[in-house]
Image: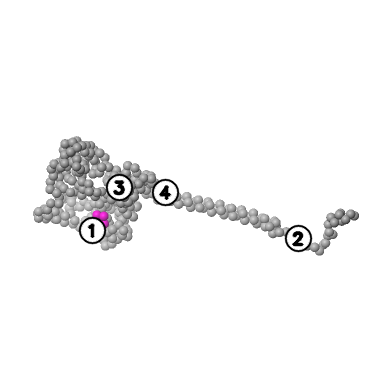
Amino acid sequence: MKEENKNMTPPPFDPGRKPEPTPWYKRKETIIGIVIAVIVLGAMISAITFGARLITNHSIASIVSEKHEYRMLNEAGEYIASGTLDVYDGPEGTKTGGSFKENDIVWCDNTAYIDETEGLWGQTKTGWILIRDEDGSYASENVLTETSDGPGTIEAAKEIILYSDPSESAEQTGTLAKDEQARYTAVFRDLIGHEWYELENGSWAAQSSSVKEIQSKESKDEPRTDEEKSDTETKETDEETIPTEFAAKYAMKIRKEPNLDAEQVGSIKENEKVMITELKDGDNESVWGKIEDGKWVCMQDKEYTYFEETETEDTKETEQP
C-alpha cells in the first residue's frame, strides 16, 4: 500500500470510546422550547395590544358620553370677557379655532344653560362661548344702571343708528334722521361707561356728540323729601317681609354657606317650593336665601333670577277686584 493511501485510512474503531456530546443550541428539545416561547410571547403581545385598544375606545366613549343636555334660555345680552374666551361649535362642543381677548365686548344672540355643570353658554355670530360654570365666571354681563328719569326728548345732529338692545353689536332697528326728534323713557349707563337712551318705541340710541338732549327730568340722584324717603322705606320693608315661600325656576344646589365656593349639601328640583327665612347679599351682586341653618340657595345674581315668590292666599285676595 502506498504511503499516501495509508494516511487516509480511518483509525480503527474503539468500543470503549464515548461519542462527542451535541451542543445545547443544536439539541432538539432546545429548538422546540425556543419555538414555543416565541409563540407564547407573540400571543401575550397581541392580548396586551387588544386590551389597550379596548381601554382606549372605552375612554373615548366615556369622554363623548360626558356631554350634557342643555336648554335654551332665549335671552340676548352683551358680555365683557374676563380673559381669553375660546369659541366652540356648540355648548360643550369642539373648539372652532376662534377666540375673544380679555375686555372684548361680546354680543350673544342667545344663551343656553346646563344644569349638571351650572354652565351658562352664549351664542355669538361665530359660535358659542362659556360665560360661567361651577368653577368660575369667564365673562360678565354688561349690566345697565339707570342714571336719570324720563321722559325726555333727543334730537339727532346727524343721522344716528338705533338698536334693538343697548349694544352696537345688537340688531339695527332703524335710524334717526338729522334734526329728527324722538322721545325716551330713561337713560342708562353700562359697565363700560357708555350711556344709552331707551326710546318709547323700544329702540335704543347711544349717547354721543351726534345726539342732542332737548328735555329731561331731574336725575335720580337728586335728594328726596322726607315724605318720599318714608314711602320708599315702608315699601322696601314690606317687600322684604320673611319668611316667604319661593319656587325654583331651575334645578339649584343647596350650599352650606351663602357663596358659590361653599360645600354642596343638597339640591332643589325645578318648580320645587322652599320657605326662605333670611336674605343675604353675596359676591358679584348675588342674593342668597336661607332655608335653615347651614342651607343656603342663590336667589339671584346680576345675570338671572333663580327663584320667584309663590302666590299666596293673601296675594290672591289683594288682586281680586
Q: Residue at x 30, y 51 (%)?
A: 82
Magenta part of the protein: which range?
A: 281-290
What secondary structure is marked by label 1? strand
Left/right placement of residue 66 relative to residue 131 reads: right
Q: Upstream in the sequence, badge 2 or badge 3? A: 2
Check whether the beta carbons of the residues at disc 2 and disc 4 lie within 8 A of each other: no
Locate the N terminus by quadrant.
bottom right
> What residue is pinned by disc 1?
280
Left/right placement of residue 188 relative to residue 99 reads: left
Check whether the beta carbons of the residues at disc 1 and disc 2 lie within 8 A of each other: no
Q: Upstream in the sequence, badge 4 or badge 1? A: 4
Label drawn at residue 104? 3
Q: Residue 319 in the image: x percent, y percent?
A: 16, 48
What secondary structure is marked by label 2? loop
Q: Amino acid at mark 1?
A: Lys
Q: Amino acid at mark 3?
A: Asp
Q: Is residue 115 visible?
A: no
Label drawn at residue 64? 4
